[in-house]
Image: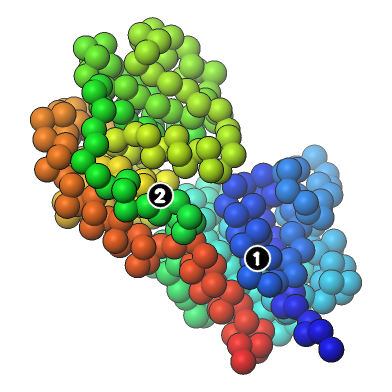
Amino acid sequence: MKARRFKILLLADSRAFHTERIVSELRRQGCQVLTASLEKGSIHHFHLKSRGPIRKLHYAFSSLQVRRLIERFRPDVINAHYACGYGFVASQATRKGQVPIVLNLWGSDVLIVPHWSTLHRLKTVRGLAAACHVTGDSEYLVESARKLTPLNETSVIPWGVERRFLQESSCSSKVHKPLRIITPRTQAKIYNNDFILDTLEPMVREGKITLTFPAFGALAKEFRSKVRRLPASGVTLYEKMPRDEYMEMVRSHDVYLSASRSDSSPASLIEAMGLGLVPIAAEIDGVREWLDLSSGITFPQDDAESLTNAVAKLLRSYESFDQIRKDNFARVQEEAVFEDNVAELLGIMRKAAGKDR
């Protein structure tokens, strides 16, 4: 008789690439996954209906639909992503002890959202408290959640890099002239891409560096208009692309750069370290667990002079970072292989469901 597959009801934003990745890998590892989402993403999912004109209440109203899904699908576990959103939905849709909830934090759901309003804080706390296990990609993120409310079990699991992209040859002493810098953070206020463009504009005009940014995000139109003032060969804006194509595009650069004002341990940073780029990032708590003087370059947030000096240092002595690049690659291989990270999460879900044997 064929063994019944482990059943996961996954509640998450169906538009998000992280959702697509984790669903695909859970299925590859033998699970039956039903994804439910209020958003209209391209991956196959059960679309939860948005009810009423007030967007912030859509999650609360969707809990009845999720309750019905639980009755029909009979999952072994609920994997909810984002505490204030789907963590809250899961808390409303289940009776205590009915189905275990494992919650994945995404960063802004505990670092930013709870400070928007009392309602947002209450929803976040409900989502956190209902979970039997909470995972985050850094100790900083998990501790930030714990400051909001007592948690049950917790784990730190990074959003790692797929094994097929990890090639030691990425750490060879190659450097382009001009130096190729990529900032793979979408055009949004929190990611501070305007600061990077304004600060490094002189180096772009002098032909010392090129910059690459996403062409999408809430502020994409405004950012594109700023880019037009620079030489066409100096700044590239890329559109969304398939995963393999994207990773090869990142690999073709020398430097990863982020000036984000808030972060946990960003997946884009870990990807860059696994692909052999030298990382530069603004000094914020969530980044420090992966980036310090032994693994790259940090600069004080919004400090234009420090950022300029960091890039100038690489222009003078990129090859001196060869050992750092090799060490970063080894750490990613050890701690942040995506397939292994998902297997760890799956082990947590099986244990929560009492099916770990």
Picture coordinates of residue 355 (x, y %)?
66, 88
Which residue lies at the image location 51% right of the left edge and 80% below the top edge?
Answer: 152
Residue drawn at the location 68% of the way across and 65% of the way down: 27
Q: Which corner quadrant holds the N terminus?
A: bottom right
280 lies above or below 267: above
- What residue lies at 45% left-to-right and 51% top-to-bottom? 165
Pick the residue in front: 173 or 187. 173
Total count of labels: 2
Question: SS class of the residue under badge 1?
Answer: helix
Q: Which residue is mark 2?
A: 271
Q: Position of residue 63 (x, y in %)?
A: 78, 62
- Which three-letter amino acid code belongs to the residue tagged 1? Arg
Is residue 27 visible from the viewing direction of this image? Answer: yes
Q: Residue, x 40% and y 27% (percent of image)?
A: 212
- Is residue 226 found left or right of 246 in the rendered image? left
* Amino acid identity at mark 2: Glu
Answer left or right for 355 relative to 35.
left
Q: Which mark is residue 238?
A: none
The reply to whether residue 60 is visible in this rendering is no
| Element marked by disc 2 | helix
Q: Which mark is residue 28?
A: 1
Q: Earlier in the sequence, mark 1 or mark 2?
A: 1
Q: Position of residue 74 (x, y in %)?
A: 82, 76
